[in-house]
Image (tube, grey):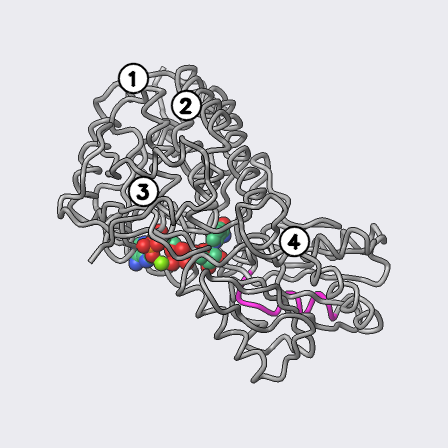
Amino acid sequence: MAAVPSIERAAHGVTSSAVLDFLKRPKNLLIGGKWVPAKSGKQFETINPANEEVLALVPEGDKADVDEAVKIARQAYEEGPWSRIGPHQRARYLLKIADLLEQHADELAILETLNNGMAISLARGMASGAADTFRYYAGWATKIYGETNPSDPSMFNYTLREPVGVCGQIIPWNGPIAMLAWKIAPALACGNVSILKPAEQTPLTALRIGELLQEVDLPPGVVNIITGFGETAGAAIAAHPDIDKVAFTGSTEVGKLILQASTGNLKRVSLELGGKSPNVIFPDADLENAIPTSLFGFCMLSGQVCCAGTRVFVQSDFHDRFVEHLTRYASNVKAGDPLDASTTVGPLVSREQFNRVKGYLDIGKKEGAKPALGGEARTGKGFFVDPTIFTDVRNNMQIAREEIFGPVASVIPFKDENDAVLQGNDTTYGLAAAVWTQDISRAHRIARALKAGTVWINCYNNIDPISPFGGYKQSGIGRELGKHSIELYTQIKSVYAKL
Ligand code: NAP
Ligand code: MG
C-alpha cells in the first residue's frame, strides 16, 4: 500500500519552491506530449535514501503504456511534424533544451540529490554537464554527412546517413540526469524519437526534465517518458517488435537479457554495462594528486559508478606508504548529508544496494582482506556506508572480481609493469582504467596495454561529451558520446542511380 508522501519530512532542509512544488504535483507518464496516468492506475513510492522518507508517488508504467508510447512515437517519426523538420530546427531544439537545463540546474541538482543521494556538488556538475551534452549534439545535427562514392561513369552512387527510428532508452539510477542526456541528445540530433525509461529508484529528474521539454514545444511523441519497473516496462521496451533500437545503461546481467530480448525483431542494441576498473599507481606518482583523485575514483557517488576505480594496484615497495596516505586522507572526507555542499560521500541509493554493499564487506573480511579504513555500514536512518579501504586483497578474491557499487576499494600490490598490466586486465570487465606515473613512456605503454574503453593518465573519472565512452569485454557493446553516438543513432543507405 503506497503511503501518502510527507514532503516536508522527505525533503527536509530544502527551501527551493521549484523543487517543493514539483514534488507536490501529481506524477504522470509523458506519452505523445501529454501527461497521462499508467493504464493500470498503479503507482509506486520513490524515496529519499538519506532519510528513507517517501518523496513522491510515481506511475507504474508497464507493457500497455509502452505499447501506446511506441504507437505514438512511430506516428511522430513517420508522419508527424518531426519527420519534416530539418537539421537546423533540430539543433535549435537541442540548444533550447540545453539552456533550460542550465537555467534549472540548481533545482534539478537538488531533486537528483533528494532522490539518488549523490552529493549536491556532484549533482550540480551532472546537471550542467547534461546541458553541455545537449549543446554538443546540437552542433552535430547539422554535420551528419553521407558520401559520394567513386562509381562507374554510367552510375552515380551516394550514401545517406538516416535516423534509426523509434529508440527505446533504458537508464540506471546512478547518474540519471547525465544518462538521460547521453541518450536523448544524440537520438534527437540524428532525427530519431525516444521512449525513455528511468530506473525505478530515481524517476524524478527525468519527469521534471519531461516538463522542461514541454516548454520547448517539441512535437508530441518525440520524447516519451515511462516510469516503471525493469521486469515489466523495461522488458517491454527491449522486446517490442516496433522499436528499432534499444540503448541500455545498467548492469551486465540485465544487459545480457536486453540482448536476448532484442532478437525478436533484431533491433540494434548498444550497451553500457558494469566495471571493475584498475587504478595503477607507481611509486613516482604525484601523490598530491594521486591520493585525492584515487579516493574520488572509488568514492564518487558513494562508489556507485560504473567506471569506479575499485581495484587500486600499487607497486609492492610503495604499498604501505600509499595505504597510509590514502587512509589518512580518506578518514577526513566528509560523509553524510548529501545536501550539504561540503559533503563528498552521501548515502547509497536504496536499501537493496545498502544490503549488497554490506554483504560484500562481510565477504571481504571472510576472504581475509583487512579494512585499513571503514569496513562497516552505519546504523540508523539512511543508507550510509563510510569509505572502506581493504588491504591484503588478492585479485582473485570475490571483492576484487565483482562489482560492489559502494565506496569500497581493494588495494592490491604488483611487482612490476608487466604484473600491473596482467592483474589489471585479469577481469571480465573492461570499462575504464587509470595509471599514475611521471614516466611519460610508461604511462602511454600502460594506456595501450590495459583492455578498457577509457584510460586516464594521472587523473580519474574525467568524462566529456567530445570523447567516446563504453566498454571492452563484458562492459558493453558500442560507444556513446563523441561522434560515436551519431553512429549508434543513424543508419546508412547506399543509393545507385543509372545515368
Ligand atoms: P540494472 O538493474 O541493470 O538497471 C538498469 C535499468 O534497466 C533500470 O532502468 C532497470 O529498471 C532496467 N531493467 C532491469 N531489468 C530489466 C529487464 N529485464 N529488461 C529491461 N530493463 C530492465 O542496473 P542498476 O542497478 O540500475 O545500475 C547499476 C549498474 O549499471 C551497474 O552495474 C553499473 O556498472 C551500470 N552502469 C553502467 C554505466 C556505463 O556507462 N557503462 C553507467 C552507469 C551504470 P529498474 O530500475 O526498474 O530495475
Ligand atoms: Mg533494478
163 over 380 or under it: above or below = above
Alpha carbon separation for disc pair 3 and 4: 32 Å
Residues in magenta, as a range:
419-429
Image coordinates of residue 1 in percent, x first then y, are 20, 58
Q: Residue 84 carries which label?
A: 1
Q: Which of marks 2 and 4 is nearer the N terminus?
A: 2
Q: Nearer the viewer, mark 1 or mark 4?
A: 4
Q: Identify the residue under disc 3.
A: 168
Total number of numbered discs in the rendering: 4
User: Type of residue at label 4?
Assistant: Phe
Instruction: From the image, give the main secondary structure of the stretch colored magenta.
Output: helix
Image coordinates of residue 305 in percent, x first then y, are 53, 54
Q: Which of marks 3 and 4 is nearer the N terminus?
A: 3
Q: Which of marks 3 and 1 is nearer the N terminus?
A: 1
| Secondary element at tag 1 | helix
Report the residue at 58% width, 55% height from top. Answer: 345
Q: Sort mark 3 into few (<14), some (14-19) or many (20+) by Cα contacts within 10 Å.
A: many
Q: Identify the residue under disc 4.
A: 296
| Secondary element at tag 3 | strand
Alpha carbon separation for disc pair 1 and 2: 24 Å
| Secondary element at tag 2 | strand
Q: Nearer the viewer, mark 3 or mark 1?
A: 3
Q: Identify the residue under disc 2.
A: 157
102 over 329 or under it: above or below = above
Image coordinates of residue 225 in percent, x first then y, are 29, 38
Quadrant of res 367: bottom right
Q: Which of marks 1 and 4 is nearer the N terminus?
A: 1
